[in-house]
Image: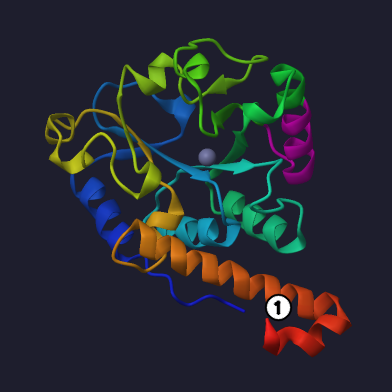
């Protein structure tokens, strides 16, 4: 089932404002100016299909951004046939795809990262140059070094030397970027955008989460009905 209750027009307006201001949309490692560049970063915590919808809209405006996907998690499976298709399409649209890494699941973080990067590179025939960290602890926020030779998005050049804004938890935690002095001055920006807050309809974070939860329940039902005959007998009772 294609879930229709999504709406990207707020995000489209957001992109247009950045374009009107004359910003260049760049990948992390292209950052070389104090003004006029914007890095659009998407940490995908829940849903690869919504990531693709966002990527398609950006492509319509010739905008390139960077999508980070969780390799080991319970929200989605990057190697499911549909998710592989979505992620490959995002890559084919000219966006960068990389690993969104959750260090909390490993005792040996470097070994865990190496495994995830190798798997991701093999699955999507790509090179992982930079990772973003899922729910980073202070250890990483204050770590300016690459990990195993791979950069991360909280290194000073991406996190402190240019202004960083994040929509984590459904609100702009450091104020809305367009109300900031740095935006008015056209300084370079690093913007973390989670698709779920922009695509799922709802007046606030709670409503959006309820909508999204129901979407996932419906998808699980369809998946179980398609793969388990006894479930088809009880589908109307669950
Ligand atoms: Zn995350």
Could you tell me residue 114's position as x and y percent? 75, 24
Q: Is residue 53 above or below residue 155?
A: below
Q: Is residue 117 magenta?
A: yes
Secondary structure of residue under mark 1: helix
Most foreground residue, 102 or 7: 102
Which residue shows up at 46% across the image and 29% down it?
A: 28
Q: In which quarter of the image is the C terminus?
A: bottom right
Res 10 quadrant in image: bottom left
Which residue shows up at 24% across the image and 46% down it?
A: 18
In the rendered view, does 24 fall on the left or right side of 122?
left
Disc 1 residue crowd, few under 14, some 14–19, many 20+, Cα 10 Å:
some
Res 99 quadrant in image: top right
In terms of secondary structure, what is the magenta stretch mainly? helix
Could you tell me residue 164's position as x and y percent? 32, 29
Q: Mark 1 points at which residue?
A: 222
Q: In which quarter of the image is the N terminus?
A: bottom right
In the rendered view, does 182 fall on the left or right side of 144?
left
Which residue shows up at 62% across the image and 20% down it?
A: 150
Could you tell me residue 149's position as x and y percent? 64, 14
Residue stretch rendered in magenta on the structure: 115-127
């Amino acid at each position: 089932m294609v879930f229709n209750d999504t709406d990207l027009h707020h995000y489209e307006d957001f992109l247009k404002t950045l374009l009107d201001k004359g910003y260049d949309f760049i990948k992390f490692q292209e950052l070389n100016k104090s003004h006029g560049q914007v890095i659009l970063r998407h940490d995908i915590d829940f849903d690869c299909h919504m990531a693709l919808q966002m990527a398609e809209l950006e492509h319509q405006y010739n905008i390139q951004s960077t999508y980070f996907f969780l390799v080991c998690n319970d929200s989605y499976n990057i190697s499911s046939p549909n998710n592989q298709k979505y992620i490959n399409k995002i890559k084919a649209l000219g966006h960068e795809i990389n690993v969104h890494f959750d260090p909390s699941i490993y005792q040996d973080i470097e070994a865990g990262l190496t495994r995830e990067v190798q798997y991701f590179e093999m699955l999507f025939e790509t090179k992982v140059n930079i990772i973003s960290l899922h729910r980073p602890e202070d250890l990483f926020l204050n770590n300016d070094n690459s990990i195993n030779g791979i950069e991360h998005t909280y290194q000073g050049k991406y996190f402190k030397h240019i202004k960083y804004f994040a929509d984590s938890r459904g609100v702009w935690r450091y104020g809305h970027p367009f109300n900031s002095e740095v935006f008015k001055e056209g300084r370079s920006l690093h913007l973390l955008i989670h698709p779920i807050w922009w695509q799922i309809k709802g007046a606030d974070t709670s409503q959006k989460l309820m909508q999204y939860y129901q979407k996932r329940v419906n998808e699980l039902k369809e998946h179980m009905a398609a793969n388990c005959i006894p479930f088809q007998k009880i589908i109307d009772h669950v």
